[in-house]
Image (tube, rainbow, N blue to C red):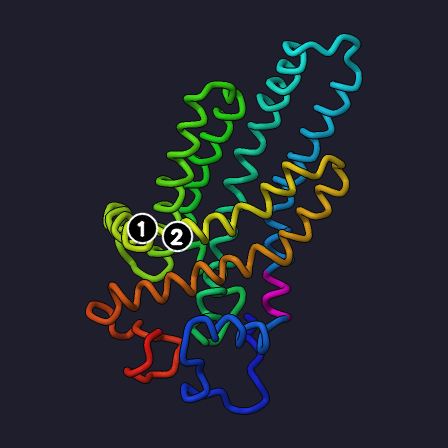
Amino acid sequence: MKKRKCAAQDYTENDFPLKRKDVFVESYREHFSLIFRLGLLSLLFLLPAIIVSFMCDVYITSTLNGLKDATEESIATVYYSANLWYGLFLIVAKTLFAVLFVGILQIIRQLLWNEPIFFGDDFKNGLKSNALRCGILAFLFALRDYACNLFSSSWISLLFDAIFYVQIIPVAIWVVLCGLYYKIGVFASIKNALLLYFKTFPVTILLLVCTVLPFWLVITFIPLLIVKYIVLIVLAVFYIVPIVMCWVLYALHVFDKFINKENYPEFYRKGLRKENEVES
């Protein structure tokens, strides 16, 4: 059981930041080593998916290079075969990452609340409270990706992609964020997530774009496999945790605005200096 190291001086509530955006900077200044370790842990959990994706890309590249007559049909067959078999392993790898990352999410919550962190205990508590929900969502999304990769040539699949990324994924993220703070049922979480998404649509979409865009750019525009996967590893260590911190901080702001002040006063402005005149 490991407790987070504190600053040399006593850190009281009067020392807390006034605004959520200041919490991000303060967290990096005071707990960079912890955030870096969480990044390494994120890479460890993502490693199975990275390895499977790398093996799939190697298979596709080597098979295409070995084709004597590379027709459109033969190329499509190679991609279909790769996605068919390696895609099954990716379903497991993506689901595993989501389940384990919930433990990191719990630690991030404690960090941004300026609460003491007991690494092992907080990680286990995160798994107990939210792993099943995240695991089911991740499995369904990975299954959807698997099907789309096999049948991705029609305009109908593009339409479903648009609906998926603009409507379903953002709501699912809010379901997970609600589950991180409130002990409520699945249907109540979905209802709250829908309401919060509609109230925060522009910022939610902006955060989603910021989350996905770096990975999409690397996967789409870096042709050399070794370079591509080195950059992906760097992103896993140095980008996943910071962008998740942004999601959690924004969720705290939204929860304070729409939920906590009236219904959960003990959560209102938690981790901030308790000054009612200052907006979080």
- Whole-percent x, y for residue 177 in the image: 38, 56
- Whole-percent x, y for residue 138 in the image: 45, 40
Q: Which residue is mark 2?
A: 204
Q: Main secondary structure of the magenta part?
A: helix
Residue 199, by quadrant, is: bottom left
At label 1, the amino acid type is Tyr
Residue 127, by quadrant, is: bottom left
- Sequence-wise, the earlier of marks 2 and 1 is 1
Q: Is residue 171 above or below residue 91?
A: below
Q: Mark number for residue 218?
A: none
Q: Are dots 2 and 1 in contact, CB under 8 Å?
A: yes
Which is more toward the observer, 231 or 138? Answer: 231
35 drawn magenta = yes
Residue 254, by quadrant, is: bottom left
Task: Kindly identify the residue that appears in the image at 49 percent across and 64 percent down.
Answer: 108
Left or right of 243? Residue 60 is right
Q: Is residue 76 above or below residue 53?
A: above
Boundaries of the magenta span: 33-38
1 drawn magenta = no
Q: Is residue 91 above or below residue 250?
A: above
What is the spatial separation of the Cα atoms under label 2 and label 1, in whole angstroms?
7 Å
In which quadrant will I find the C terminus?
bottom left
In which quadrant will I find the N terminus?
bottom right
Left or right of 42? Residue 151 is left
Task: Kindly identify the residue that appears in the image at 20 percent across and 67 percent down.
Answer: 263
Task: Kindly identify the residue that appears in the image at 55 percent across and 28 percent down.
Answer: 88
Which is more toward the observer, 202 or 35? Answer: 202
Q: Secondary structure at mark 2?
A: helix
Q: Which residue is mark 1?
A: 197
